Image (cartoon, coloured by chain):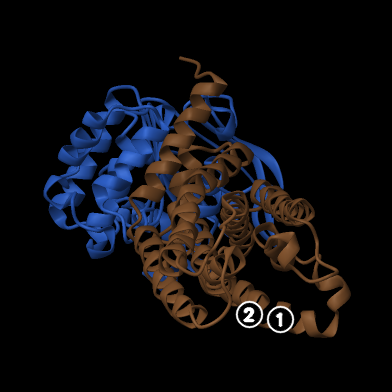
Amino acid sequence: MITINSLVKHRRKQEILSGISFKARPGRVTGFLGPNGAGKSSTLRILLGLDRATSGSALINGKPFAELDNPLTRVGAALDGAGAHRMRTGRAHLCWIARAAGLPRARVEEVLEITGLTNAAGKRVGSYSLGMGKRLGMAAALLGDPEILVLDEPVNGLDPEGIRWIRTFLRTRAESGNTVLLSSHLMGELAETVDDVVIIKQGQIVADGTLAEVIGKHPTLEEAYFALTTEYPGENV
Amino acid sequence: MKVSFNRRLLRIFAAELEKLATLPTIRFNLMAAFMLNLVLAAAFTSAGLQGAAGTQAILNTGLASMEYLQTGFIVLGVLSACSEYTGGQIRTTLTVMPWRGLLLSAKLLVLALVTVPAAFIIAGSGILYSFFMMKETAAGIEIGTVISSLTGATGYLTLTTLLSAAISIVLRRSTPAMVVLLSYYFIVSPLTMGILPGISHYFPDRAGYYMYTPFTFAEADALTALQGTGLSLSWTLMFISAAIGLYRRRDA
């Protein structure tokens, strides 16, 4: 369970997050939506202990991220890009992560296989396409077979096959009782993947509920999203 | 299952060691430092053969390249620290090992463990080359003095690497870190020696100079090797403490 509680973040004199609260529950895929600069990435970064909150809390099973015993086996995170040095090979990148978490090398080969990177594992990350970089980030997130996945724009840059793979994969993870929190701006993809939706706009939560609740009377999630996040909803119709 | 502190520390050590070992630029940098140092040692030896003899000549010649050799170790410190900020690796590092103070301390310790043998071999190769080329003229070489100077040179290069890494962690980007460090070592420090000779001894590089320069060969107001080591170590620890303090508090 992920619990975001009254989270506030100030950067310089700007308020990035204005006391947001929501939960991502086990067994469900929670979509975290919002326009660029709304505060999605800041929220995920605070949740993962990368940034400090000005006030409020972001907890994983009741604990801040830094207090988790072996974080990789509890939370798999894939933020923007591969999160790897360009000069290192994909396999070498995964190997140091596995070593840091006390995982066997065999697990590296398993996640390379799962993400379809086995043939590219010996190449330097700098030569990877955007989609391959995403897959590498995903492979790192899956190394510890965690019960919680936190993914920032996971389908961005993936080809149609990759998008279908990740959709099926995330559904399977959630159906096994795992928690999945993902941010995205691709409404069509999200509507087919998520159970719950949280929409953020200018650092404030403007919608939080099941997919059906958030869509409400709107014909699609996209329509609901624009109605909730646009100053003048008609301009996007 | 709860992971003990020792096991956690061992895993961080192992991961950081693997990171260094699998970064090609680190290997290239050390190999380049080794080769260039030998070339410089050959050049200085060739010039030295026409001059003085004995232990002083061998040491002076073998360590004459230190001023240039330290650049390789400054680059080593910068590369090892700033590599975290390439490709967003810092995010991966901190989500796998979020214990920032422990992580950075272990990272610098691993860097020191890699640097010590590298510095010993590279600095030693220069002295060894000079010794073989000048042994005919080096009557009564004092092995104790040579070992002491080589140990000092190894220590100085290691502390320079750590200090460079600490400053790079504060700056996060390799270009500004290189500009700041190289400007200090090659412009500010030499200028200060001329302008403020009384206090320039206490700067990290000048204090470090006395770590590998035998006291008897140095100028009258020189520091002893122990004083030089103490001062150089203090500067390095001060920058490391500042880097750890900042690293723990700031957004990644």
Vertical relation: B36 (above or below) B112: below
Q: Secondary structure at mark 2?
A: helix
- Colour assignment, chain A: blue
Chain seen in brown = B
Q: Judge from the rendering whether residue A181 lies leftward or rightward of residue A8; answer left or right.
A: left
Host chain of mark 1: B
Q: Quadrant of the C terminus of chain A?
A: bottom left
On screen, residue A69 above or below A21? above
Residue drawn where x is 69% and y is 48% of the image: B249
Residue B176 vs residue A24, the one in the foreground: B176
The answer to which image quadrant residue A131 occupies is bottom left
Residue B248 visible in the current orientation: yes
In the image, B227 versus A134, the foreground residue is B227
Q: Callout 2: few (<14), some (14-19), or many (20+) C-alpha neighbours within 10 Å?
A: few
Residue type at tag 2: Phe
Which residue is more in the foreground, B72 or A72?
A: B72
State the mark number for residue B186.
2
The three-letter code of the residue at mark 1 reads Pro
Query: Residue B190 bears which disc, if any?
Result: 1
Between A205 and B79, the residue placed more toward the observer is B79
Q: Are marks 2 and 1 in contact (CB under 8 Å)?
A: yes
- Label 1 CA crowd tier, 10 Å (few <14, some 14–19, many 20+): some
Q: Is residue A12 left or right of residue B134?
A: right
